Amino acid sequence: MHSDDIWPRSLDLIRQEVGENIFDLWFSPIRLLQIKEGTAVLEVPNRFFKEWIEDYHPTLVTDALERVTSTRLGVRYRVSGNEDAALKRADARMRSRKSKLARKGIYLNPRYTFESFVTGPSNQFAHAAAMAVSETPGRVYNPLFIYGGVGLGKTHLITAVGNRVVDRSQEVNVLYVSAEQFTNEVVSSFRHGKTEELKSKYRNLDMILLDDVQFVENKAATQEELFHTLNVLYEKQKQIVLSSDRPPKEMKQMTDRLRSRFGMGLIADIQPPEVETKMAIIQKKAEQDRLALGEDVVSYIASRVKSNVRDIEGCLIRLGAHSSLTGQPVTLAMAKTLLRDFIQEDDRPLSVEGIARTVAEYFGLKVADLKAKKRTKDIALPRQIAMHLARELTECSLSEIGKHLGGKDHATVIYACKQVEARSARDENFSRMVQTLRNKLQP
Ligand code: ADP
Ligand code: MG
């Protein structure tokens, strides 16, 4: 068969498989550039094609090519057009990191780098700590413990440490593992009597990136194994990087010695991004995805997506897909229609009730306790904090706030606010805690 026939014939097969509409949208614009060394290089109009095809029809193209050529070819996509040189370089760097990682048998997401991480006040501290650790692993902060809510970049940041270290040195044995996977490996090593193998795998690492360590709460045997593993690595001055959805002191179901091991280096938190940081993240991602977005769309997404960076990415993928499908540029009107289910139009003002609930939950109290006339010490402080936040974040009068929170008068509320402000000024941890609560209430 003539090589010019390969692609038209493959396209025919693909058309039969997916139907006319999808074919026209996603497959007919693709060109076959060359087949070389067992790989077919396909040119696609933009990066969404590649992602869409890989997500929805991961084997369709290879299968079609195989039926036409009787050869199992690899497939590579190349984005057409005049691409910005800097972006091309970034892509090339990522590809080379990808193959280097593969060669070394290290599983790290090559996209999660310091370069692609946007910093702002909410994550600066954790970012700086991660950078420091990647410069001199095992020397400065060991372990580095990063905690924060879902989708705020913990996995990204701890992976970036690994990528930086791999980029720099030839022989380094880095392992990224989720605590869940670690647990599975422990369980299976017990079951199959292979604990020695587990030990030799984990205790000979140069660096461990252990993600979502809160997963081992309640799991005594895994905690035991983890404790010894971390000890060995620590003794050998090997870097340990941990992530969690909460700080060590809030992991109640963790043995004391493991909890204190977690806190022996540096603990850094990631807070939800401020609007400005969200805007910077959106701009960066849009640029990476070659998606042109106006200022109005950027600030619309930044102000409406509450706090989760993963949701921001979801918005951009949807906009990008729609825009390349229809060939239309992204407009604010388009964003408003398309992103309806991502975005909560919930602009209801905060209530004292809502604040009481959040504060009570944070301190492990019952809402009723905060609201009732109880006067024990463990309730007094949370109640003062709730009063302070209610004055700051609601339109309620002082006496209303007092009435809802322990039946106090307005003078008590003023006193409470003063107390909280004074303590925030002199006690950094306290101030951070109040900020955490504020962020929970007003993401
Ligand atoms: P977590 O592990 O905290 O749940 P992830 O690290 O998985 O969150 O982040 C979710 C997504 O958001 C990832 O795709 C990540 O690249 C992206 N992301 C989070 N924070 C940032 C940031 N500051 N800059 C760029 N991308 C970010
Ligand atoms: Mg994660």
Image (tube, rainbow, N blue to C red):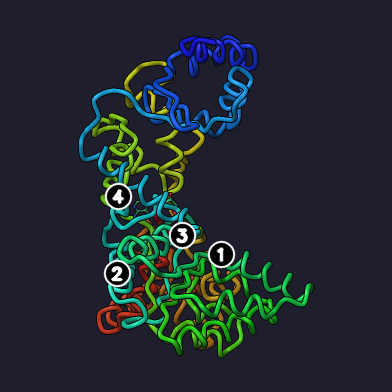
Which residue is at the far right?
191
Q: Label 1 CB, ligand 2: below 8 Å?
A: yes
| Residue underneath mark 1 | 178
- The CA span between labels 2 and 4 is 18 Å
Q: Which residue is mark 2?
A: 125
Q: CA distance from mark 3 to mark 1?
A: 19 Å
Q: Nearer the viewer, mark 4 or mark 3?
A: 3
Front in this rendered view, residue 218 or 138: 138
Query: On the rendered image, what quadrant is the C terminus found in?
Result: bottom left
| Circle 1 SS class | strand
Mark toward the start of the polypeptide (3 vs 1): 3
> SS for tag 2?
helix
Q: Are marks 3 and 1 in contact (CB under 8 Å)?
A: no
The image shows residue 284, relative to residue 330, as above or below, that is below
At label 4, the amino acid type is Val
Nearer mark to the viewer, of 2 and 4: 2
Task: Say few, some or many: other residues with alpha carbon within 10 Å of mark 2 (under 14 / 14 to 19 / 20 or more).
Answer: some
Rate crowding at label 4 as few (under 14), some (14 to 19) or many (20 or more) other CA atoms within 10 Å. Answer: some
Q: Secondary structure at mark 3?
A: helix
Residue at image x 64%, y 84%? 224
- Tell me which corner region of the image, top left, top right, bottom left or bottom right, holds residue 68: top right
